[in-house]
Image (cartoon, rainbow, N blue to C red):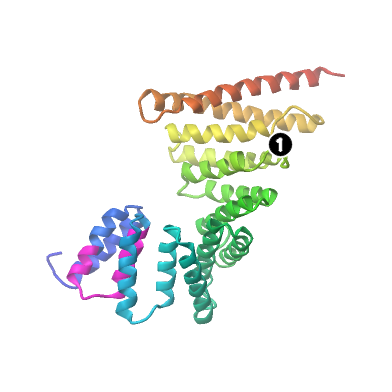
Amino acid sequence: MSRGLPWDVKWLQDCATLRCKQARQAEAAVLLEEVAKRTPPHEATLRNLGTVYNQLREFDKAKTYFDAAAELVGEMEKEDLWNLGLVHKNKRNYAEAAPMLEQALANWIRDDPTDDVTLAKLYDSLGSCYDEMGRHEDAITQLLEARQLYNRSIGAESPLYGSACERLTRAYVHGGRYDEGLDAMIEAFTVIALQDAVHPTPLFELLGIALEEVPLTRGVDPIALARLEVPIQAAVRNMHYRALDRDGNCGVLFERMARAMVLSSVAQGDREQQDAAARRRSMARALLNHAAPLVEAATREGLADLTHVSLLIDHEMKALDAQDVAYRVALAEP
């Protein structure tokens, strides 16, 4: 910093970029505000500040910076349409958000038709906007395009691809297309489960869609959840390797994982189906045994009241016991 311009500004910018990648946007905002003080007005700095404040959910402040960037340039460029469209979407001003995002996408297709990743992000933004507006079929169309572009450009193992699958899951389910929603959910879960930066929250939320928004037993066969067996195993291994399986967050996630296995593992069918269901029940029991003390500790230590999760674990254990008895009876039959 003592060397002065331009080195101090470069340090501030680089440090702000790092803080954003570390999800420390509040610190990044302070650094970028300092950049703005030390340098003449520049649209890139203003857009970066707007982006950070948008991520911090300070939407009015974000809009002020995005407006300032457009005013400085002298016109509303495609980046500004995208940025301001996202602000309006986040503020649920959909009547303003959707046209801006549509125009940003059209302008990007016109100017940079081969920029697959940016176009995928724009399709993603517009699709999620449509979904929140209740235009679920339009959302599905946009999100399918986003997923295809991500797959073509950066591959199906990318976190961006997984995020597109997650948003597609929501659009399918909100639109009542539950079987396709489950397909997209399982794909999203698999991608996230295998990431180096695996985290319990998106896995928990995806399972919540399958368990609480999809009408299982009323049109959708719970056996479809059996397809989560291998992805769940992968997630458990990955979380253990990264020491993410030791707190209440893990406990509530493992309960949902176990619930998916319980629902898809009724003791019925032929011998092969019965054996597969018994294997999943064994997996569910291991998950619940791991989850129970973590959930109880979180409640006892005042971190969160997870009493309801402990009750779910007890209920699911009893369901497993009952199905195991039915399995043994079936095996004893001639």
Image coordinates for residue 130, horizontal then vertical, percent: 55, 61
- Vertical placement of 321 versus 69: above or below? above
- Furthest toward the left, the residue is 2
Q: Position of residue 53 (x, y in %)?
A: 32, 59
Residue 206, percent from left and from top: 55, 45
Q: Main secondary structure of the magenta part?
A: helix
Secondary element at tag 1 = loop
Residue 47 inside the magenta-drawn segment: yes
Task: Pick whichever, 254 or 144, lies toward us.
Answer: 144
Query: Residue at the spot x=87%, y=19% of the render?
Result: 334
Residue 278 vs 17, above or below: the answer is: above
Q: Mark 1 packing: few (<14 Cα in 10 Å), some, or many (20+)?
A: few
Residue 208 in which image quadrant: top right
Q: Nearer the viewer, residue 243 or 161?
A: 161
At 84% from the left edge and 18% from the top edge, which residue is drawn? Answer: 333
**Residue 51, above or below 216:** below
* Residue at screen point 50% across, 50% down: 195
Residue 99 seen from this side: yes
Q: Would you name the residue on which mark 1 appears?
A: 217
Compared across the picture, whether 45 is left or right of 236 comes to left
* Whether residue 161 can be seen here: no
Q: What amino acid is at disc 1?
A: Thr
- State yes or no: residue 273 in magenta: no
Residue 277: x and y in percent read 71, 31
Q: Is residue 20 left or right of residue 37?
A: right
Measuring 25% from the left and 63% from the top, which residue is drawn there?
Answer: 32
**Farthest residue in the right direction?**
334
Extent of the magenta region: 33-54
Specify the quadrant that holds the N terminus: bottom left
